[in-house]
Image: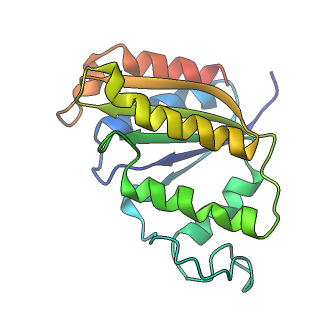
């Protein structure tokens, strides 16, 4: 197994919550098999929505508006694997991680090829009803297909609401194994 450059993008604004713990577990697994991992916690960064200004990559940065996306964009370009880790908000991604996803438009707008990457989704939520995760899973799969990325899987950590509750579930071990198997 060769070393991969892995980018983990989290979307929770809550520090040390269930998403953070799942991201930590995934990273532990990925690093244990000698992958190079970079992490960005978009939920705690200043990343605004795309303004549709059409000025992508015109000032040396992915986004003409100065914000945290410009620190993530170079990592997206050079990573082999992109991992999205987010709580489930209204059947989808948090708005914080969605800002990163929306600003990935800058790569398409400027003709930068992102194809050939691998991707994973780790999502957690209070609902134990698997159908509540269909919206985020569909969006993730459509995004992967559009970007010509290889979907390496989805982990749905269901039924975890309280901060840190996920630590007492099998989902932590599953996230670690996902990291080991990328």
> Taking 19 as reference, is 113 above or below it?
below
On screen, residue 64 above or below 139: below
Q: As drawn, which residue projects farthest toward the bottom? A: 59
Quadrant where the image shows the C terminus? top right
Q: Residue at 62% x, 31% y: name it.
A: 31
Query: Does 174 sit above or below residue 31?
Result: above
Rendered location of residue 10, percent (x, y): 45, 47
Residue at 22 percent of width and 30 percent of height:
126
* Identity of the residue drawn at 49% across and 32% down: 137
Residue at 46%, 69% in the rendered image: 47
* Colour mode of the rendering: rainbow
- The spot of residue 25 in percent (x, y) is 46, 28
**Image side of residue 4 versus residue 16, left or right:** right
Q: Nearer the viewer, residue 30 or 139?
A: 139
Report how many numbered discs are placed on residues in the image: 0
| Horizontal arrangement in the rendering, residue 6 relative to residue 112 (left or right) | left
Nearest to the observer: residue 3 or residue 100: 100
Percent coordinates x, y for residue 142 in the rendering = 61, 39
Most extreme residue toward the left is 162
Quarter the N terminus occupies = top right
The reply to whether residue 18 is in sight is yes
Q: Quarter of the image holding residue 8? A: top right
Whether residue 24 appears in this view of the structure is no
Placement of 22 over or under 76, stated as above or below: above
Q: Residue 179 appears at what percent x and percent y?
A: 58, 26
């Amino acid at each position: 197994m060769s070393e991969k450059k892995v980018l983990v993008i989290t979307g929770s604004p809550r520090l040390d919550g269930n998403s953070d713990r799942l991201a930590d577990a995934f990273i532990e697994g990925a690093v244990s098999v000698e992958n190079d991992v970079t992490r960005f916690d978009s939920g705690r960064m200043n990343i605004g929505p795309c303004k549709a200004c059409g000025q992508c990559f015109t000032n040396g940065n992915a986004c003409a508006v100065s914000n945290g996306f410009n620190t993530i964009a170079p990592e997206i370009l050079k990573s082999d694997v992109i991992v999205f880790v987010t709580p489930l908000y209204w059947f989808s991604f948090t708005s914080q991680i969605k800002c990163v996803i929306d600003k990935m438009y800058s790569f398409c707008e400027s003709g930068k090829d992102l194809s050939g990457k691998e991707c994973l989704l780790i999502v957690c939520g209070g609902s134990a009803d698997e159908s509540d995760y269909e919206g985020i899973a569909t969006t993730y799969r459509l995004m992967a297909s559009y970007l010509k990325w290889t979907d390496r899987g989805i982990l749905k950590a269901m039924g975890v609401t309280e901060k840190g509750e996920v630590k007492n579930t099998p989902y932590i071990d599953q996230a670690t194994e996902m990291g080991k198997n990328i």
